Image: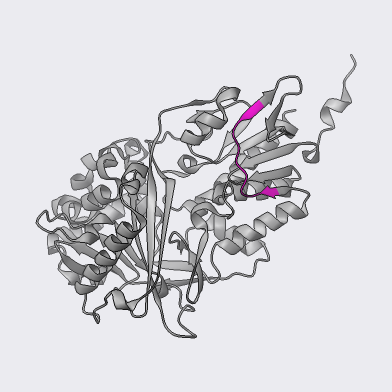
Amino acid sequence: MVVNLNRFSKKPSDFKIAVIGAGASGLSTAYELQKIGFNVDIYEKSQNLGGLAGALELSKGKIDSFYHHLFKSDKHILDFLNKNNIPVSVKFKRTKTGHIWDDKYFDISSIYSLRKSGLLSTYGFFRLLIGGAFIKYFPSNNLNNKLVHKYMKKLFGEEAASRIWEPLLNFKFGRFSKYMPYSWLRTRIQDRTIELGYLNRGFELIYDYIADQVIKNNGNVFTETFIKKIRLNTQKNKLLINGKSYDRAVITTSPKVNEKILKNINYKSNKIKYLGAICGVIEFDKKPIPSYWVGIADTNKKNKSSYKNFLAAISYAELDEEWNKSGKPSWPLYLASYCTKEHYMKFSHDQWKEKMIKAAIELNKLSSLDSISEKNIINFKLSFAEYAQPILSPSKKLFPDPEKAKFCYFANMHNIFPNDRGQNRAFYIGKVTAKKIHKELILDI
């Protein structure tokens, strides 16, 4: 018997991998692949890296265009930062959290604050604690694919369900709220820690570092590069992307995009709905709200306030202690919500600006802070991402379903779901995807 030893002589540097999309999951996967030794090219249609973690410029410097913070449980991204010499530090601190219900502001920063706030009765308060403890410390996988809206009252009691959790679900997902699985709620509670962390120079620095590493290792980062089709060279068993040959591709784009670019390589997908994310940043010259985070859950139908167009307001300088240590103070305020592209396009940039300014002023009036007005605005920035929140009930393992295509691996947003921590989960997905490609091309060759 003659054994073809050449069959076993392949190494990672013999293979070329394309990564489509330079968001967090694409860049983290590219980093893991080049670390193993694969040749990697990254394709990004915009001029910026990081996707939802991109940055925008305000009067005192850059901040993330979509708000981000870290928990101490975000071990994947924290491990990456600890192992690499990146000039960025993560600082953790306790922050104040507010809750809007029935046109009133409640401080729910801690168990003590929540009890003192009057949002819940004594019974409702303890019933909420019991439900949260059950989910955090005694998770039930049997509930994962159950519809969570049917279990809210059973888990938290009537009062907490109607004043906190059900409005949160409805404000976040709108007409899709009845399709959300229990696993979304479970991961939301289990992932949380009391202290929040921020990067003193933003997430953008991390992704610039990864791009530099790819380039140093003979890879390429093609920004402002649009891909119309990915084709298959059947003779060589390779993918053809913009005139270049690749052994495999990692796809991080949305199913809507994938239907077009992967049409010629047997792309199959389950039906996946998703929402876009709209995020405005209003930079004020004085403090607009009394806490870092304000969740909006006002179900009072008589109240027509503009803030009800959004699910949260986030005061950046409350988390980043360095922001106001020098120069004139400023207070960037995020106003965020999920919505479809169709809903976003109903209003112009100026109309969204007007809605957000009104919402910020209304939220300010619910607090005991000095009042704010349009005269206090320094900057306004508006961002929208069409593909931000998948609506699907996950199986035990999403990877590589619910999408498939010849020679392709998928590391997009619905591979992160139901975890809410997109940046952290992206670094986990990067490791998983790189290991699968290595196993297929090298270990199983």
**226 is within the stretch colored magenta:** yes
- Quarter of the figure with the N terminus: top right
The quadrant of the picture occupied by the C terminus is top right
Is the residue 445 above or below the residue 37 in the image? above
Residue 27 shown in magenta: no
Residue nearer the viewer, 96 or 327: 327
User: In the image, what residue occupies the spot 66% across and 45% down?
Assistant: 42
Between residue 404 and residue 229, name the one nearer to us.
Answer: 229
Q: Horizontally, is 387 left or right of 22 in the view?
A: left
The picture places residue 177, in percent across and down from the top left corner, at 27, 42
Residue drawn 52% across and 58% down?
A: 54
Residue 314 pos. (x, y %): 35, 66
Image height check: is 248 above or below 413?
Answer: above
Q: Quadrant of residue 319?
A: bottom left
Q: Name the dominant secondary structure of the magenta segment.
A: loop
Q: Residue furthest left?
A: 302
- Quick check: 19 left or right of 97? right
Residue located 51% across and 41% down the image: 412
Percent position of residue 376, x then y: 32, 78
Q: Nearer the viewer, residue 334 or 111?
A: 334
- Can you name the residue that lies furthest to the top here? 1
Residue 397, visible in the rendered structure: no
Q: Is residue 342 visible?
A: yes
Magenta stretch in the rendered image: 221-231
